[in-house]
Image: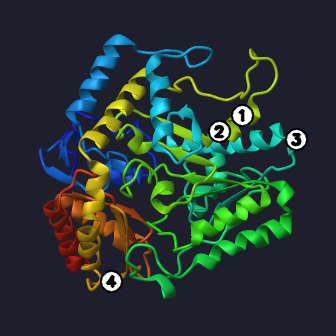
Amino acid sequence: MKNPLHNEIDLSAYWMPFTGNRAFKNEPRLMKSAQGLYYTTIDDRQIMDGMSGLWCCNAGHCHPHIVEAIRQAAGELDYSPAFQMGHPGIFRLAERLAAMMPKGMEAVFFTNSGSESVDTALKIALGYHHARGEGQRTRLVGRQRGYHGSGFGGTSVGGIGNNRTAAGPLLPGVLHLPETYNAEHQAFSKGQPSWGAHLANDLERIIASNHASTIAAVIVEPFAGSGGVLVPPVGYLERLREITEAHGVLLIFDEVITAFGRLGWGSAAERLGVVPDIICTAKGLTSGTVPMGAVVVQEKIREAFMKGPPTAIEFFHGYTYSGHPLAAAAAHAALDVYENEGLFQHVLGLESAWEEGLHALADKPHVIDVRNFGLAGAVELRPQNDAPTERAMAVFRETFDRGLLVRTTGDIVALAPPLVITETEIGQMLGILGDVLDDID
């Protein structure tokens, strides 16, 4: 599709993120509006959103309650500094978030994105050990194929090679657990695979090799979204929790994707019954409407910083837009929608239909795996011999042309629709994808 507004819009100045800029600008995909489950392109085609925008528009697009909350907030308090002052909405939001998270997670630090949440969580972990007289605990442990945003901290603990190759040495002393995915033992698992809990034991090797006294924290996604919807084996996260507790290492869950209903709960920690020390959130917090993130921590961690005179700054960290009034209004409204419309329960009610529909694609050409967890899923394709990633990109382009937005990573096609989707719409969405899979080479 050539740019229908090529004489009106100059595409050259914008350097797009995570995009093949040259290919895109030759054949752009431009949206002009959105409502509910659908985008509308500038040439008036409706596109079913199979990815909640970018894992974030959980309440669907332009929900009237959220839109009105943002509109009112913009006319009342456009900005309030977050340093040495605040506004009522952000304190109420912190209280509300703490109530949604597992017991004991009572302190909330606000950011503007998932990347900022991760970097904040890493600094909190290092600062916590320093405050307790264990400042030698500086090592951070991530995981292969993990994605933790685009900041230097998140890129360092992340485990996707293409994100790291041109970024220099990154943070020193970062170590990585092996990925949890093994096609031989896990392919076509429904929900959590039964094989793989033992992979967490590699953390014991890392600790033995480097000594527990040097390790500050382990950070993992409950399921690795950007890495290709890699679902945690049964017992894997529980084992990480056991090991970290035994050695005084903090456990951080990156729930930027999983929090706020993707798994039918407020957090994956609740869904899985594994309580970390720190949870990173963003995306669904405002249903993608206004940039915002939040880091929720165990109260014991915040208390460790509360030293010195009461007027002293305890944590030298923050952002100009931490707790922004518009973001706070959007978050309150999004949480209202999740609660009043029962969207988390709605997800739980759709899980079986979602799982059944996805796995019905298992016999399509080139499919080598299907994975699902909550209202997220992935179809992995056999790569072309001479062009890895091209088969999935062909699916991306063709599904868009047929009215469906998906996401790709490598030769994996990922799906994570807005939580408002119905069982009928699941059938329509997976029907489009299935037809495309039948047709591509």
Mark 1 neighbour class, 10 Å CA radius: few under 14, some 14 to 19, many 20 or more: few
Residue type, mark 3 in image: Gly
Residue type, mark 1 in image: Glu
Q: Nearer the viewer, mark 3 or mark 4?
A: 3
**Which residue was labeled with disc 1?**
303
Numbered tag placed on residue 299 in the rendering:
2
Tell me the element at label 3. loop
- What distance separates the C-alpha of mark 1 from that of mark 3? 14 Å
- What distance separates the C-alpha of mark 3 from that of mark 4? 55 Å
- What distance separates the C-alpha of mark 3 from that of mark 2? 18 Å
Q: Where's the N terminus, which quadrant?
A: bottom left
**Which residue was labeled with disc 3?**
133
| Front residue of this view, candidates 96 and 8 | 96
Q: Nearer the viewer, mark 3 or mark 2?
A: 2
**Which residue was labeled with disc 4?**
366
- What distance separates the C-alpha of mark 4 from that of mark 1? 53 Å
Tell me the element at label 4. loop
Mark 3 neighbour class, 10 Å CA radius: few under 14, some 14 to 19, many 20 or more: few
- What distance separates the C-alpha of mark 4 from that of mark 2? 49 Å
Where residue 205 sits in the image (x, y, percent)?
Answer: 78, 73
